[in-house]
Image (cartoon, rainbow, N blue to C red):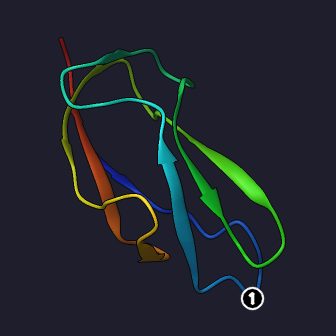
Amino acid sequence: MQVVLPKWGVSMQDAILVRWLKQVGDTVEKGDPIAEFETDKVEVELESPMSGRVERLFFEEDDTVDVGAVVAEITET
């Protein structure tokens, strides 16, 4: 499953990836925080939409990520 950056605010266009909380190969449960993002107003944790294993991370820390961009890939275990 592809994990995308959601739109957390009406005017939000992008966010900065502050840090990854999970790495490739890590097991996650649905709802686990996988990354921290900073918008122009707040710092937010992005949660895993499913349980599984992190297969791929598409951005580096400090990257600016557009709303709707695929940030990670998680597969069922």
Question: Among all residues in the image, which is located at the extreme front?
Answer: 62
Q: Which residue is drawn at 45% across and 15% down?
A: 29
Indicate the amino acid at tag 1: Ser
Relative horizontal placement of residue 26, taking residue 29 as reference (left or right): left
Q: Can you see residue 57?
A: yes
Q: Farthest residue to the right: give it.
A: 41
Residue sitting at x 48%, y 62%: 5
Q: In this view, does 12 lie above or below 71?
A: below
Residue 1 visible within the image? no
Q: Could you tell me which quadrant the N terminus lies in?
A: top left
Q: State the residue in front, 34 or 7.
A: 34
Q: Residue 64: x, y in percent?
A: 46, 77
The quadrant holding residue 27 is: top left
Please give the name of the residue rendered at 40% of the width and 26% of the height, measured from the top-left corner.
50
Can you say whether 64 is above or below 44 in the image? Answer: below
Task: Check disc 1 and report the residue beneath it.
Answer: 11
Residue 5 in the image: above or below residue 77: below
Q: How crowded is mark 1: few (under 14 residues within 10 Å), some or many (20 or more)?
A: few
